[in-house]
Image (spheres, rainbow, N blue to C red):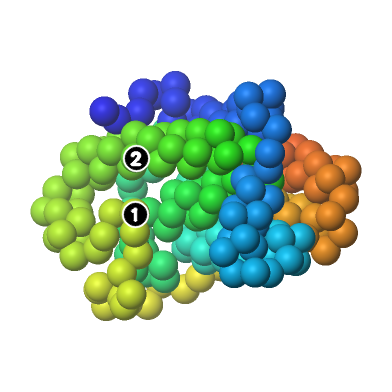
């Protein structure tokens, strides 16, 4: 079932609400998912669980950096007013950069973010965040696919047949058309995502939860501001 107009227009808000709901699920169970996995793994490998937990948090931070890079790369081939538009922009079909490997690199980045941020949640929160993000992303994708099919017809069908929907191919599936990336636009659009990565990296280094939430809160504000500014820009243009 595809996303409604309201869901698509408010996807940044709903993205944030997924985490806002999942983090407090420590009220259901208090154990952190990463610590639980480190304890389980440490028992079987005969290793220090605390050391394993720090390594796992470092891996989660690396995953967040990868998500930020993928989203920035993808946004570099779009304008910020497309990334945060309240409606599906179908004027052009982008098939360069990461779009040669996967049709929805931005949403793939969202899945990686859910997995990375899940390292800071309880086991229940981690499962809820990842499942909710998967379902939400697929609903958004189905909405966009329908609109692109209506606008581009056979051209989009050929692209859809060649390139995977959400899970990237190990190699590019179509030839590059030569469209240049605008990296400054990409970093501007994804500044909040780099904030998420910085928050998790800071925690992996310091193990200070206040530092994590301080940086994360700033990143959430950046996400909200980016969405609001672009909505106003699109409305006035």
Say left or right for 55 vs 67. Answer: right
- In depth, the one of 49 and 125 nearer the eye is 49
Residue 172 occupies quadrant? bottom left
Residue 99 seen in render: yes
Residue 227 occupies quadrant? top right
Instruction: Determine the residue located farthest toward the left in the rendered image.
Output: 154
Tell me the element at label 2: helix
Figure check: 195 above or below 175: above
Residue 101 occupies quadrant? bottom left
Residue 46, image x, y percentages:
65, 69
Residue 190, image x, y percentages:
63, 54
Residue 196, image x, y percentages:
70, 51
Q: The N terminus is located in which quarter? A: top left
**Picture residue at 71% right of the left edge, 60% below the top:** 49
Looking at the image, do the residues carrying marks 1 and 2 touch, with CB atoms under 8 Å apart? yes
Residue position for label 2: 138
Sort mark 1 into few (<14), some (14-19) or many (20+) by Cα contacts within 10 Å: many
> Which label sits on residue 166?
1
- In depth, the one of 169 and 172 nearer the eye is 169
Residue 69 seen in render: no
> Which label sits on residue 112?
none
- N-terminal of the pair, mark 1 or mark 2, is 2
Figure check: 143 above or below 39: above
Measured in 3D between alpha carbons, the distance from the residue under mark 1 to the one under mark 2, in whole angstroms, is 9 Å
- In depth, the one of 100 and 1 nearer the eye is 1
Tell me the element at label 1: loop
**Picture residue at 26% right of the left edge, 43% below the top:** 145
**Picture residue at 58% right of the left edge, 39% below the top:** 123
Sort mark 2 into few (<14), some (14-19) or many (20+) by Cα contacts within 10 Å: some
Q: The C terminus is located in which quarter? A: top right
Say left or right for 37 vs 166. Answer: right
């Amino acid at each position: 079932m595809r996303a409604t107009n309201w869901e698509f227009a408010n996807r940044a808000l709903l993205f944030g609400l997924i985490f806002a709901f999942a983090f407090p699920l420590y009220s259901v169970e208090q154990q952190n998912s990463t610590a639980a996995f480190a304890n389980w793994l440490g028992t079987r490998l005969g290793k220090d669980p605390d050391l394993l937990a720090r390594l796992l948090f470092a891996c989660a931070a690396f995953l967040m950096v990868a998500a930020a890079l993928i989203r920035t790369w993808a946004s570099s081939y779009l304008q910020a007013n497309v990334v945060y538009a309240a409606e599906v922009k179908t004027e052009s079909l982008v098939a360069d950069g990461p779009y040669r490997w996967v049709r929805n690199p931005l949403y793939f980045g969202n899945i990686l973010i859910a997995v990375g941020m899940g390292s800071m949640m309880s086991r229940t929160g981690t499962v809820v965040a990842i499942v909710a993000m998967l379902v939400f992303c697929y609903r958004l994708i189905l909405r966009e696919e329908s609109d692109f099919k209506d606008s581009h017809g056979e051209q989009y069908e050929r692209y859809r047949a060649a390139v995977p929907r959400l899970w990237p191919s190990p190699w590019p599936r179509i030839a590059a058309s030569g469209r240049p990336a605008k990296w400054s636009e990409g970093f501007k659009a994804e500044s909040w995502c780099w904030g998420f990565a910085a928050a998790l990296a800071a925690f992996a280094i310091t193990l200070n939860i206040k530092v994590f939430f301080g940086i994360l809160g700033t990143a959430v504000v950046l996400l909200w501001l980016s969405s609001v500014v672009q909505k106003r820009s699109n409305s006035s243009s």
